Image (tube, rainbow, N blue to C red):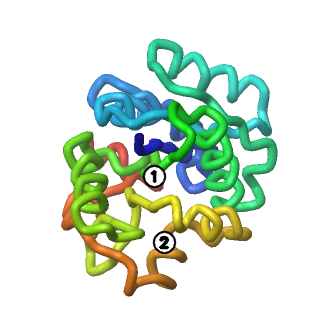
């Protein structure tokens, strides 16, 4: 089955607080995003949290307590998104329900209009076309959420620093399909972003 990996170890510097536990439409951004993995029936479902602050990690675990997800901890999130991708992918392979994981969806917390239907559309496009990467299209770019076939796992694990999934999407554009997702351009970077959405 397709794995689902939610990257939630960001340090939220621009937000000025605990963005993962900020509330939108009655639920934390973290819980909302993790719920999409369960609603999409991905397995395993991995949420990567920061391990830099024990109290913050515990609060994030509490926010996920009622969800059927596996938690992976990134002890050094300051090394960039690549470190969370690597930890999430390794956790997905450890917790796989079958010997082979055909692909993984990588998503983030702050795209508040992401839906399970869109995540399933990424997976469906990959399965029907054989594309190694299926990205979301918005604001004239291709980005996350995105599906990566197992043939791309080594490339994901080799990422360094702040090079994330978008770097591979650009580098392997010829292997990529794009599913339109206009609401993907709306993300929460600052507290004012969230205030305006409310």
Q: Nearer the viewer, residue 58 or 40?
A: 40
Q: In the rendered view, tell whether residue 94 sits above or below residue 89.
A: above
Dot 2 falls on a residue whose secondary structure is helix
Residue 42 circle label: none
Residue that carries the numbered disc 2 in the rendered image = 166
Q: Are marks 2 and 1 in contact (CB under 8 Å)?
A: no
- x, y percentage for residue 116? 26, 40
Most extreme residue toward the top, as rendered?
66
Q: Position of residue 91 (x, y in %)?
A: 65, 40
Q: Is residue 175 left or right of residue 65?
A: left
Quarter of the rendering containing residue 32: top left
Q: Residue furthest front?
A: 99
Q: Which of the pair 59/169 is nearer the observer?
A: 169
Q: Residue at x 57, y 56 (%)?
A: 14
Mark closer to the observer (2, 1)? 1
Residue 17 visible? The answer is no
Relative to 28, say whether 166 is above or below: below
Query: Residue 115 in the image: x percent, y percent?
Result: 25, 43
The residue lying toward the viewer, choosing from 145 and 121, is 121
Quarter of the image where the N terminus is located: top left
Total marks shown come to 2
Q: CA distance from mark 2 to mark 1?
A: 20 Å
Residue 102 is marked as 1
The residue that appears at 67% across and 46% down in the rendered structure is 90
Closer to the camera in the image, 66 or 175: 175
Which residue: 27% across, 71% down? 178
Secondary structure at numbered mark 1? loop
Label 1: few (<14), some or many (≥20) within 10 Å? some
Residue at image x 33%, y 32%? Answer: 41
Question: Could you classify mark 2 by the number of other residues whose Cα lies within 10 Å: few (under 14), some (14-19), or many (20 or more)?
Answer: some
């Amino acid at each position: 089955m397709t794995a689902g990996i939610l990257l939630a170890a960001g340090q939220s510097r621009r937000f000025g607080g605990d963005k993962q536990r900020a509330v939108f439409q009655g639920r934390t951004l973290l819980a909302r995003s993790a719920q999409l993995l369960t609603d999409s029936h991905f397995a395993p479902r991995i949420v990567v949290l920061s391990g830099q602050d024990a109290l913050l990690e515990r609060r994030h675990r509490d926010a996920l307590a009622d969800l059927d997800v596996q938690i992976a901890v990134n002890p050094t999130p300051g090394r960039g998104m690549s470190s969370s991708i690597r930890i999430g992918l390794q956790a997905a392979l450890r917790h796989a329900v079958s010997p082979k994981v055909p692909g993984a969806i990588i998503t983030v917390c702050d795209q508040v209009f992401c839906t399970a239907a869109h995540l399933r559309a990424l997976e469906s496009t990959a399965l029907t076309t054989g594309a190694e990467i299926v990205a979301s299209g918005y604001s004239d770019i291709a980005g996350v959420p995105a599906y990566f076939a197992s043939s791309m796992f080594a490339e994901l694990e080799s990422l360094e620093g702040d090079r994330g999934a978008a770097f591979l999407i650009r580098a392997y554009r010829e292997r990529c399909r794009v599913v339109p997702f206009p609401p993907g351009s709306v993300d929460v970077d600052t507290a004012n972003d969230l205030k305006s959405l409310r």
